[in-house]
Amino acid sequence: MSRASTTGHVNQLAWFKSSYSGAEGGECVEVAVCPDAVHVRDSKDTTVPVLTVQAQAWDAFVGFAVWSGAV
């Protein structure tokens, strides 16, 4: 896992929010998926550093969240 500045290639990524995110606001994150990594950022302040995790770690996190009923 690493934190990266939003400069450079990170700004060129295709970012998206979860379909569970509503239009009313709140704390939302956006993700951008690459073959070997998943980048996560604050949807309200895209100037703060981005969290980058390996694709395998993201898959494990999502699998646990679905299994535990968190999503």
Image (spheres, rainbow, N blue to C red):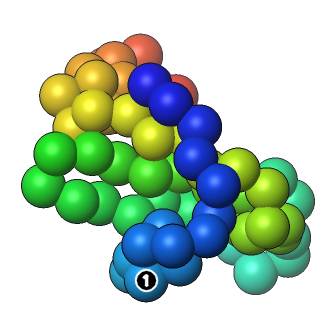
Instruction: Say whether residue 28 is visible.
Output: no
Left/right placement of residue 24 relative to residue 30 reads right
The answer to whether residue 28 is above or below residue 59 is: below
Instruction: Say whether residue 51 is visible.
Output: yes
Residue at left offset 36%, top offset 24%? 61
- Residue 45 in picture, x, y percent from top left: 84, 66
Indicate the quadrant where residue 67 lies: top left
The answer to whether residue 41 is above or below residue 11 is: above
Left/right placement of residue 47 relative to residue 50 reads right
The answer to whether residue 28 is above or below residue 70 is: below
Left/right placement of residue 43 relative to residue 13 reads right
Residue at left offset 61%, top offset 70%? 7
- Residue 48 in picture, x, y percent from top left: 79, 56
- Residue 37 in picture, x, y percent from top left: 27, 45
Residue at left offset 79%, top offset 67%? 47
Q: Which residue is mark 1?
A: 12
The answer to whether residue 15 is above or below residue 31 is: below
Question: Which one is in front, 50 or 40?
Answer: 50
| Screen quadrant of the N terminus | top left
Q: Residue placed farthest to the left in the image?
A: 35
Question: Which one is in front, 24 or 32?
Answer: 32
Q: Few, some or many C-alpha atoms within 10 Å of disc 1 (few <14, some 14-19, many ≥20)? A: few
Tag 1 secondary structure: helix
* Count of picture labels: 1
Question: Which one is in front, 3 or 53?
Answer: 3
Q: Residue placed farthest to the front in the image?
A: 8
- Residue 17 in picture, x, y percent from top left: 53, 69
Indicate the quadrant where residue 64 lies: top left
Residue at left offset 70%, top offset 50%? 49
Amino acid found under the numbered disc labelled 1:
Gln
